[in-house]
Amino acid sequence: MRPLALAREKQSGQLRIWYDIRQNSPRAPTFQEYLEYEGEPDVRYELVRGKLVPMAASTHLHTNICRFLLYKFQRYFATGNLDLVVNALATGVRTEENTSRIPDLVVCSQTVWEQVLHRIGAGVLDFAEKPILVVEIVSSNRRDDYVIKRNEYELAQIAEYWIVDPKDKIVRVFTKPNNEEGYDWVDFKEGTSIVSPQFPELVLSVKELLNPPLVEHLMKEEQSKIQTLEQRAESEHQRAESERQRAESERQRAEISEQRAESERQRSEKLAQLLREMGVNPDAL
């Protein structure tokens, strides 16, 4: 009997099927095989209890919310000088022995990201590489996000999980208060801002998040503000330079006046000395 009991290259339609040669029957791929799997171009797969599940294409709103969140978190981390990394629609998270999810947004430490950055295979954070936040945007299968993934992220001990729900117009934030094992959750509705225990200074309006502006517009506004600040700084610099030059001119004029006064004083002393030598008292004049 052959010692190798796997044959990984058989195909069925477009999806690869793993076979056990001894049983000549399909079997579930292992987690490692999932990491090495190369499927169809532009199709992303989650591994759900040993089954490859293709992910549905994102709607434009879904994508826009992802891009907006990515933008907001990147600015927040940069402003706060936080050693955190955020990725959208790309990084997987292992939640069970044979399950790996691809959240819409994943936040992890820079240390974790640098450890996995050059690892070969699919970009999945393993059990020891926990993210500190995952975000799912509700699309077609609501039960997945509200029940199944919620349970998986809770059991995987991920500190914070957000569900962004454009249909119900809420953002549900799951957290583990006081390091408890189970999640607590709070719904944030339109007209309020999201409160995150891990990111207390983050200002994020629910209304804006559910219907966000284009990131390109935000970047243009940001660039416009930078240019305005640069122009204002240049104007202040030119004003300060003008004041400096004016002060320098005043100093030079004062110095010339002082030199002129000193010359007059020396001339007066020489004249007085000359008069004394001629027998004339200059004070009597």
Image: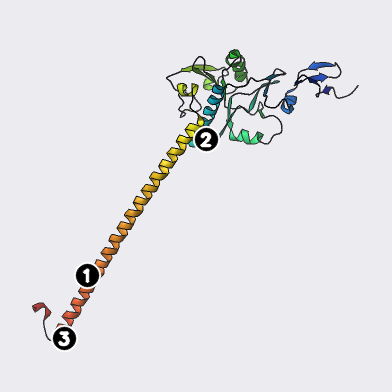
From the image, state whether disc 2 or disc 1 is nearer to you.
Answer: 1
Label 3 packing within 10 angstroms: few (<14), some (14-19), many (20+): few
Which residue is at a point 50% across and 29% down the rendered structure image?
214
Query: Going from the N terminus, do you reach mark 2 or mark 1 first?
Result: 2
Task: For the N terminus, give its image quadrant.
Answer: top right
**Kind of residue sitting beneath label 1:** Ala
Q: Residue furthest bottom?
A: 278
Label pair 2/1, CB-CB below 8 angstroms: no
- SS at badge 1: helix
Q: For mark 3, what is the residue?
A: 277
Q: Which quadrant would residue 67 be assigned to in this image?
A: top right
Label 2 packing within 10 angstroms: few (<14), some (14-19), many (20+): few
Q: For mark 1, what is the residue?
A: 261
Task: For the C terminus, give its image quadrant.
Answer: bottom left
The image's mark for residue 82 is 2
**Kind of residue sitting beneath label 2:** Leu
What's the coloring here?
rainbow
Residue 146 versus residue 232 in the image, above or below: above
Q: Is residue 160 visible?
A: no
- SS at badge 2: loop
Where in the figure is residue 133, as x and y percent of width and height?
Answer: 56, 25
Where in the figure is residue 22, as x and y percent of width and height?
Answer: 86, 18
From the image, state whether disc 1 or disc 3 is nearer to you.
Answer: 1
Residue 188 versus residue 272 in the image, above or below: above
Cα separation between marks 1 and 3: 24 Å
Cα separation between marks 2 and 1: 63 Å
Work out whether residue 275 or residue 60 is closer to the camera in this orientation and state it.
Answer: 60
Label 1 packing within 10 angstroms: few (<14), some (14-19), many (20+): few
Residue 71 versus residue 163 in the image, above or below: below
Work out whether residue 233 or residue 161 is closer to the camera in this orientation and state it.
Answer: 233
Cα separation between marks 2 and 3: 85 Å
